[in-house]
Image (spheres, helix red, strand yellow):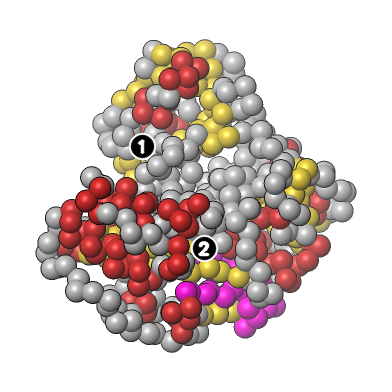
Amino acid sequence: MKLGRFLVSAVSAFAVVACGGGSGTDNRTGGKPSPTPTSQPPAANDCSLAARKTWVSQQLNEYYLYPNLIDNTVDPAAYSDLQSYIDALVAPARAEGRDNFFTYITSIEEENELINSGSNAGFGIRLAFDENDRLFVTEAFENAPGFSAGLDRGVQITAIQGRSVAARLADGTLDSSLGPPEPGVTRTFQIIDNSGVSREISVTKAEYNLDPVSDRYGVRIFNDGGRQVGYLNLRTFIAETAEDDLRAAFAQFRSAGVTEVILDLRYNGGGLVRLAELLGDLLARNRTNQVFSRTEFSEALSSENSTYRFQSQPEAIDVTKLAVIGTRSTASASELVTNAFIPYLGDNLALIGSNTYGKPVGQIAVDREACDDRFRIVAFRTVNADGNGDYFGGLGSVVPNFCRADDEIAVQLGNATEDSISTALDFLGGRGCPATASVPGQQGARSVAPTLEALQPARPNRLQREAPALY
């Protein structure tokens, strides 16, 4: 089985199996090995649990980035579901902080729907706690039922189905009280809206498409003392539709002569590597053919190693200063883009907000169509032009500047007065950078305790892996 059959994605990001070849537009370099299977695979149409366990074990041993951290002594019969078996196989890698449930099984059909159009079912809201365990909406998708019912950034949810958030938090039922990600699921919420009024609303989950860039606040050009500063809030790299949004945003920046940019990736958990590379291209007009990133597989598959170089794009600008707004929900493809510009921008690059998640590894997708199984396997790591990419502790340990700022949910995203955006403008304008504190137990890292903590289940669903805290 050739790796050339697959598109790769940043960890916890999506890729599509490309039958008969790669992406077709991939600018990486590298060979296409044909590893010899180590054992007889199960019959293609055998979808029994035992056959699926055999299949995932074989794929893992063939492609896993950390072959020495697979526990092949695990007894398959001891596990009643496939994901638990996978988790047991990669437990040694998880113990070393290299695979935090990033290797998983999912549905081909459901994932393809999400990639192609961003289609999913839910309320369309992101949720987080403040330091007092109050539950707030941090973001709302405009075409989803939550926004239509009055749930938007800054709204506090005090009760769900007549039971207080505090009580549900105490007994561990908060996540389950929100219901499965299925159309027709209805919940009542007691809320305190942005006018300070307490009221009850009812919201029914429905299908909606993720809009990668909000029409309300996704793109701005701030006049900061006569300087034109571009602002882009990119919600996700998941959906292919992000390409048009990115090109449109940078066409505006280019027309306005923008060279300083705020990338607001505070809730962006990753997505397609191809879109991360496009974003890099759009920021690097004068760096064509210079290294954006290198992709490195295991030693056995090192002939697959590849390099992506910046490509010319008609909408591209030449960024001279870059401020990236991040939180613990900022991961994978978002971190890849930020890390890629460190060698080129140096002290003209800053992370604003709080530390990011820390996912410098990526996945391939292996499909077993008869069973609708897509196996997401951590198979590669990405490094920048300087060969640096070990930021498992978050980007706070590697960025040249790390400026503390709050995620100020009382102020709408895209507003220049919001604390993270205001801090980014100050950095770009040379007006200082609030200091950050050290991460306990992490040598040389810098971070800051976030003012908000995303409501993210221990085992996120397929969407929440890429769009943290989205319900």
Q: Residue furthest front?
A: 73
Magenta residues span 272-298
Callout 2 environment at 10 Å: few (<14), some (14 to 19), or many (20+)?
many
Residue 361: assigned label: 2
Residue nearest the observer in this picture, 152 or 36: 36
Residue 467's place in the image compared with 189, above or below, is below
Residue 282 counted in the magenta span: yes
**Disc 2 from disc 1: Cα separation:** 29 Å
Residue 48 counted in the magenta span: no
Q: Residue at x 11, y 64 (%)?
A: 45
Residue nearest the observer in this picture, 70 or 341: 70
Give coordinates of residue 387: x percent, y percent. Answer: 65, 74
Q: What's under tag 2, amino acid-wise? A: Val
The residue at which mark 1 appears reads as 122
Which corner quadrant holds the C terminus?
top left
Q: Quadrant of residue 21?
A: bottom left
Mark 2 / mark 1, whichever is N-terminal: 1
Q: Residue at x 59, y 16 (%)?
A: 196
Q: What's under tag 1, amino acid-wise? A: Gly
Badge 1 marks a residue whose secondary structure is: strand
Residue 353: assigned label: none
Q: Residue at x 52, y 63 (%)?
A: 361
